[in-house]
Image (cartoon, rainbow, N blue to C red):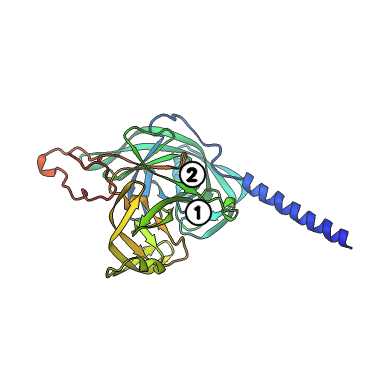
């Protein structure tokens, strides 16, 4: 009798290991390739609090490192088909959080070629010139919430440059010139998170001399730095009340406009938000935190800053940039 139980337990354990191995083998974005891997692989203009990126006329995606998988709507598929890029439907199961934080289980995947256009402005009207690059074989799950999302499964394949003044996002596979390393990144190696399509990336940040690893989440709409309520004890200053809107709802928050923050060898005062929701306790959005160009290198696990501002050229002295951002806690060299 004991031998039968032992054999049964071994069989169950073996099935579990095989199933776990199968899930890990169905990773996403392993077949990505580019027409041109040099320079900017892809470029997107950003808009709105959700950081919606437009890669081609009418083809928009939310940029969300907090989403484990990339999703696309039926409307997005139709735009690509109209442009001559036909998705290839595949059947295999994928599991992960989507762009609003819900767990999505899908048996359908689409392999898609994404054409990245360069957007320019002429006479106050927007025009697009030629396609600068095509990223092939990008995996998407069908969207179940009406959002097309470029999630961390896709974004972690690149070095991502956020141009603060231009509100543009550029993708690289080779490090561009002009950046200085700020701090090293890390990612979760927990068994529970290994089944997701993308890793969960963290950056060490110290607030009021208390350091924690902050989850890098570009889905945070208003907040640069998010801490849980119980961390309010770290400051003796009177805090203001606010309401934070996130993908999961509205949450009451306390905000500290004078929190002392350091990241790598950069430091200064910055606004910290204290609130609880059902997402990571400690989180940060680099696109809201840094008031200068920043490059997140998910490939080599580093975060870089540009030593000086990348300010667009102005046509007249009257429109010259002011020093409104000269108090950035992360600026290496102030503009001359």
Q: Nearer the viewer, residue 276 or 56?
A: 276
Quarter that holds the N terminus:
bottom right
Residue at image position (52%, 48%) is 198
Vertical position of residue 285 compared to residue 88: above or below: below
Q: Is residue 12 left or right of residue 230?
A: right
The reply to whether residue 211 is in sight is yes
Task: Pick the residue in front: 216 or 96.
Answer: 216
Of residues 40 and 253, the one drawn nearer to the viewer in this rendering = 253
Q: Nearer the viewer, mark 1 or mark 2?
A: 2
What residue is pinned by disc 1? 143
The residue identified by callout 2 is: 154
Which label number is shown at residue 45? none
Please identify the quarter of the rendering in which residue 237 is found.
bottom left
Give x and y (percent) for residue 304: 36, 41
Name the outermost residue toward the right.
Answer: 1
Please provide percent x and percent y for residue 40: 38, 34
Q: CA separation, marks 1 and 2?
A: 15 Å
Q: Secondary structure at mark 1?
A: loop
The answer to whether residue 48 is seen in the rendering is no
């Amino acid at each position: 009798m004991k031998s039968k139980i032992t054999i049964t337990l071994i069989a169950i354990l073996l099935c579990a290991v095989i199933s776990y191995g199968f899930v890990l083998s169905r990773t996403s974005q392993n077949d990505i390739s580019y027409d041109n891997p040099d320079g900017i692989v892809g470029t997107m203009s950003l808009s709105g609090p959700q950081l919606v990126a437009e890669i081609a006329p009418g083809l928009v995606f939310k940029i969300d490192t907090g989403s484990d998988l990339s999703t696309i709507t039926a409307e997005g598929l139709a735009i690509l088909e109209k442009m001559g890029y036909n998705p290839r439907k595949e059947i295999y199961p994928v599991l992960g959080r989507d762009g609003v934080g819900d767990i999505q289980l899908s048996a359908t995947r689409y392999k898609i070629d994404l054409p990245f256009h360069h957007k320019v402005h002429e006479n106050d009207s927007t025009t697009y010139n030629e396609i600068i690059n095509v990223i092939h074989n990008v995996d998407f799950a069908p969207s179940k919430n009406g959002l097309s999302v470029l999630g961390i499964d896709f974004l972690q394949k690149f070095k991502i440059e956020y141009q603060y003044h231009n509100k543009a996002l550029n993708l690289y596979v080779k490090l561009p010139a002009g950046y200085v390393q700020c701090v090293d990144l890390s990612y979760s190696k927990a068994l529970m998170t290994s089944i997701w399509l993308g890793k969960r990336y963290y950056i060490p940040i110290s607030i009021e001399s208390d350091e924690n690893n902050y989850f890098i989440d570009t889905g945070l709409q208003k907040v640069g730095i998010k801490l849980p309520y119980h961390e309010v004890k770290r400051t003796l200053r009177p805090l203001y009340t606010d309401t934070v809107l996130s993908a999961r709802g509205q949450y009451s928050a306390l905000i500290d406009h004078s929190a002392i923050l350091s990241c790598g060898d950069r430091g200064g005062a910055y606004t910290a938000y204290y609130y609880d929701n059902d997402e990571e306790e400690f989180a940060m959005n680099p696109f809201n935190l840094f008031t200068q160009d920043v490059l997140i290198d998910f490939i080599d696990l580093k975060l870089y800053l540009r030593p000086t501002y990348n300010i667009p050229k102005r046509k007249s002295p009257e429109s010259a940039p002011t020093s409104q951002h000269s108090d950035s806690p992360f600026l290496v060299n102030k503009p001359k």
